Amino acid sequence: MILTAAGTVLAQTPLAQQGVIGTGETVVFWILGPLALLGALGMVFARSAVHSALWLVLTMLSLGVLYMAQNAQFLGFTQIIVYTGAIMMLFLFVLMLVGRDASDSVVEVLRGQRLVAGVLGVALAVLLTAGLARSLEGVVPAAPLDPWAPGGGAAGGLGQVIFTDYLFPFELTSALLITASLGAMVLAYGGKGRKPRMSQRETVRARFRGEYARPSPLPGPGVYATANSVATPALLPDGSVAEDSLSEILDNTPVERLRPDREAVSGEVESPDPHALTGRSPRWSGSEESSEQRERGEEHSSAEASGSARGGDGDDHGGNGSVPTVDGDVPENPGADSPEEVRQ
Amino acid sequence: MTPTHYLLLSALLFTIGTVGVLIRRNAIVLFMCVELMLNAVNLSLVTFARVEGTIDGQVMAFFVMVVAAAEVVVGLAIIMSIFRTRQSASVDDANLLKY
Amino acid sequence: MNETARLIADDPIWLILLKVVGTFAFLVVMTLLTIWAERRVIGRMQQRPGPNRAGPFGILQSLADGLKLAFKEDIRPVLADKWIYVLAPVVSATPALVAFSVIPVGGEVTILGERTALQLVELPVSLLVVLASASVGVYGIVLAGWSSGSPYPLLGALRSAAQVISYEIAMGLSFIAVILYAGTLSTSGIVAAQENGWFFALLPFSFVVYAIAMVGETNRAPFDLPEAESELVGGFHTEYSSLKFALFFLAEYINMVTVSALATTLFLGGWHAPWPLYLVGDGVLNTGWWPVLWFLLKTMAFLFVFVWLRGTLPRLRYDQFMNLGWKVLVPLSLVWICAVTAIRGVRNADLVGSREFLFIGGGVVVALLLLAFLVPDRKPQPAEHDEDEVPLTGGGYPVPPVDLRVPESPRGTTVSATSGGRARLPESGQESTGSTKEDPDGND
């Protein structure tokens, strides 16, 4: 009934003030209206909370542009700057700090709640739309305020009205904002008293006095490192291993987990040929030859491994073993190579 | 097209927000559904301002935005402190006062 | 309606498309040139040539870098959120491009028979478009950091976003005084209001605040800690490669160009010609296509200041520049806005004439300077002595004990067979001086 009363009041707008909704606004509405609905549905039904927030951002941006289409340009931009840019950003910050696996459980606490909620939601939608559509049939919008004039439309008009007619609510909202920020600070930082944080100077002093476990950070591989892996132990100036640089996590990793990486690095396993059309390698040999070469490849690698284990003074033999020991790709003169390398 | 279309859109967004509040269990998503309802109301306020040709509806929408900002700040702070103590963001878990 | 808005309102579609394409091309070319100029200028400041191989004076270097980035492998971490990971660079780059649409590059011109203004869009609140795009651009940073699925990007993104938001506030506050003086929020109106005096002279404090805020807003040195944090880890774009990284890069430089263009528009008179030149020929240098030149020169001056700051100043720590943003810029801006309002109110009510006003203003400035000089310098505090501190020789700095014997390095013993022990650590002074004199760098 209230809706019909509102409808009759609105429909009685005098003819001289009536405006027409142009095609531009119609196009904007029919694109952004469904987009806003899509965003709202996406927000309600998205599984991840961050995705929900992003769908809501889509809805809010669409609504901001719809405000601009209805000649509320300052309000539209305020919607984008304040609502989307600040409030939703705050939501995203909290979501990221709370954790990404904060999703809903499928099991319902109250039985049948979702079904009833769905039915009631549809019922409410039907009620509101039917009521509004029937009562506001003949509504024609008034002539739009000129946004360029300092008195109407955009920032100037809003400012005039806020600071004259609506001054008291404005002051109340400023008090509200101060209260809200104070409350947030108390909730975030209050509770049990926090220790005052030590400054850098005090931290350094405490470190060197021995209040911490060690005065400096843990050593990395260091200047004399022979490899750039984090697992390489650091060497002290007298050649011994620095105990602090050994990582418990890496030492306790099962060898099986590292075996594929180690094999790939050592070259014992043939890596797939990047130029091959299929996954098999090498590229231009038949299957028997490839299996031959794979066998020889294994011989090579085992010979090399034993060779390197024996050859502590490998520099002397550097000249002799100058035949390139490439695994199996070059099939020419295979007979001559293998005895030499086995000898090594 | 008439401004009634805007009001219908606003009504639909409002109901979607209501259903979201009833369905979702994550406190923050619930809060976002409340924000959606506030936005729907803002849209209808701006539409009425446009129909009347005055600027009062826009001022009301402006105040709604300010109040929503303050509410979000305090609400999220509360949710964060609940999360810190109970390690859960689900509204089903905040049931200590249940008989 | 604004003159500019009237000119733009009847643009045909082809002209709008031409302006859109022109804006996009201008921004991308300015980005390439800015990257090149940055590397050359910083090189010269560090007394080295900078890139000079790709093209004459190395000018094709940024193009080569862009192509290299395009050909790099495009990775996506396993833990990354698939859709948001791809969306984040787009959300970062798009608002940066949109923000430039409201900047007046020139006055009225005639393009192919159509009278128009050199501005893509004009709204009564067009200054808010820039603020809105800055607000939406923060989403790109936060989403990039979160969606990468690893801790360093998330922390870097949160820090970066907090910094951008804080300096956005300082930027907005610096706009208020300009809006008060111009009486409008539209950018072309602000440019038109500077016909008699540019705002950097009338509102110097706003200009200073805006200059600092624009450097903080774009995450540039000396406020670039979230980006350069232990520079191995790149902050929010750590896990990005190839074209997505190129989009972030592009977004950062386009933001730089936009805030420089905005500084020109708000404080340096936009496209107006500088002082002696606008008197030439009864203002002919302010008509036609001449304003584009003045605009470009002013914008490039600001870009040079960006590059200059990067090459000169050391990086501020995160809490130092957050302190600067919140505890210095915001309160002082608020005080300045109150002062500007009071001045405007006094001038509007005509209580004080122009000359008396200048005298009073000069007197206030002189009084502030005298106060600044009269405040005594803080004397260096004497070092506090703790009870349990052992007095060391060497003026309080830790020195090694005099009887220290440095053991022999194991590497020196193995290499000595081949290279004669030059790599051995010096055990006594004479040997070391001998070897270092022969071979200063110690390696063959």
Image (spheres, helix red, strand yellow):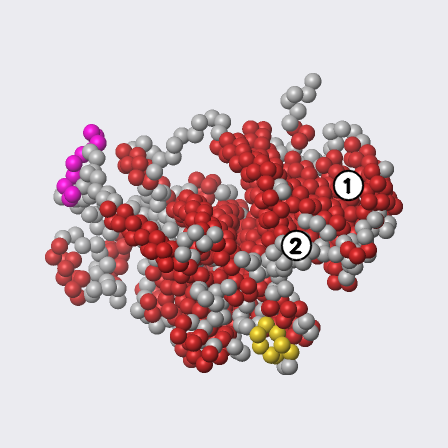
Residue toward you, C318 or C367 = C367
Quadrant of the rendering where the C terminus of chain C is positioned: bottom left
Disc 1 marks a residue whose amino acid type is Thr
Residue B15 numbered mark, or none: 1
Q: Is residue C387 magenta?
A: yes
Residue extending furthest right? A134
Residue A115 image point, x, y percent: 81, 35
Subunit bearing disc 1? B
Disc 2 marks a residue whose amino acid type is Gly
Quadrant of the rendering where the N terminus of chain C is positioned: bottom right
Q: Would you say A8 lies left or right of B92 here?
A: right
Q: Would you say A11 lies left or right of A291 here?
A: right
Of badges 1 and 2, the one in the foreground is 2
Residue C102 image point, x, y percent: 58, 64
Number of disc labels = 2
Q: Is residue C144 magenta?
A: no
| Residues in magenta, as a range | C386-395
Residue A153 numbered mark, or none: 2
Residue A36 visible = no
Compared to residue A181, the image places residue C127 above or below, namely: below
Residue A180 image point, x, y percent: 55, 35
Secondary structure, mark 1, is helix
Subunit bearing disc 2? A
Q: Are marks 1 and 2 in contact (CB under 8 Å)?
A: no
Residue toward you, C73 or C217 = C217
Label 1 Cα crowd, 10 Å radius (few <14 / some 14-19 / many 20+): many
